[in-house]
């Protein structure tokens, strides 16, 4: 594949390193210096990993250029319906994920299974803690939001999540998410079920950025020949089949 990297920070560089090892070619690197002037020519797919302020403009550029785009930026999902209409209007291709790591998707399946069991035991409350590097601009993380949405789906007593600095939100229907920003933490997510007598935790900790890079490339390979809007769940189904 000939890949355009829209966003050339730590994740973009990790994707580049892994892509080259797999025999792909990086034909465009979009940085702050050329963010307003880049042209999408000679590439098969774009991987977008910038920030909430830039992502919508980058998606539109890819759709206008008829380039499939894999979107790793979060913080734009309130505009999802508009983006989907644009994809359909341009007969384009878009794949989005709050997290590209295969390990995170396995973590989510474990959360789903545990929540199904815990739903029978009303004496446990649940909370989420997420920890990321200090440069991360959005809070809570997209991964934490997806985790909360899974728990809401499986737990009859919960119907929403709330970002909070408090350790526990003791409100029956709310899942509290605590967002911490520390050093260069790649990404840690913890789901805690706690009663008066014990505590059960599920934790995913990214040790480096290779998991995100590998998943982004899987997504790009998956998207090349497709039209429409896809998620990483579609990639995982294809990966596991």
Image: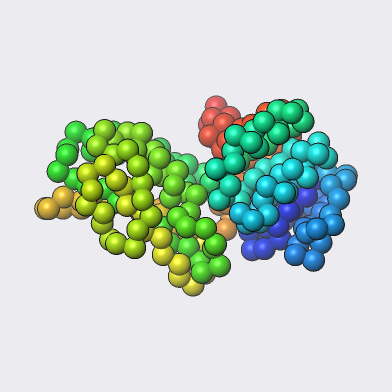
| Residue 24 seen in render | no
41 sits to left or right of 156: right
Which residue occupies the foreground of this view, 107 or 154?
154
Furthest-right residue in this view: 42
Which residue occupies the foreground of this view, 105 or 50?
50
Q: Position of residue 12 (x, y in %)?
A: 68, 57
170 sits to left or right of 162: left
Q: Position of residue 31 (x, y in %)?
A: 76, 62
Which residue is rendered at x = 65% and y = 37% of the image? Answer: 83
Furthest-bottom residue in this view: 183
Which residue is rendered at x = 74% and y = 53% of the image? Answer: 5
Q: Position of residue 92 (x, y in %)?
A: 74, 32
Furthest-left residue in this view: 197
Which residue is rendered at x = 36% and y = 46% of the image? Answer: 161
Which residue occupies the foreground of this view, 237 or 41?
41
Decide: is 122 above or below 167: above
């Amino acid at each position: 594949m000939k890949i355009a990297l829209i966003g050339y920070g730590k994740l973009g560089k990790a994707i580049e390193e892994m892509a080259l090892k797999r025999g792909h070619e990086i034909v465009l690197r979009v940085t702050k210096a050329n963010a307003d002037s880049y042209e999408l020519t000679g590439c098969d797919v774009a991987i977008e990993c910038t920030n909430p302020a830039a992502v919508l403009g980058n998606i539109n550029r890819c759709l206008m250029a008829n380039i499939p785009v894999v979107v790793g930026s979060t913080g734009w999902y309130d505009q999802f319906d508009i983006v989907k209409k644009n994809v359909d209007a341009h007969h384009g291709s878009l794949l989005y994920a709050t997290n590209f790591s295969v390990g995170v998707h396995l973590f989510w399946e474990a959360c789903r299974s545990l929540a199904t069991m815990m739903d029978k035991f009303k004496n446990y409350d649940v909370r989420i803690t997420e920890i990321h590097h200090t440069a991360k601009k959005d809070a809570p993380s997209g991964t934490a939001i997806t985790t909360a949405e899974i728990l809401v789906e499986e737990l009859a007593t919960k119907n929403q999540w709330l970002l909070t600095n408090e350790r526990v939100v003791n409100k029956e229907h709310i899942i509290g998410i605590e967002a911490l920003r520390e050093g260069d933490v790649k990404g840690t997510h913890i789901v805690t079920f706690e009663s008066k007598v014990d505590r059960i935790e599920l934790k995913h900790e990214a040790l480096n950025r290779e998991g995100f890079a590998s998943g982004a490339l899987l997504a790009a390979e998956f998207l090349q020949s497709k039209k429409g809007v896809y998620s990483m769940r579609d990639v995982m189904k294809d990966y596991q089949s």
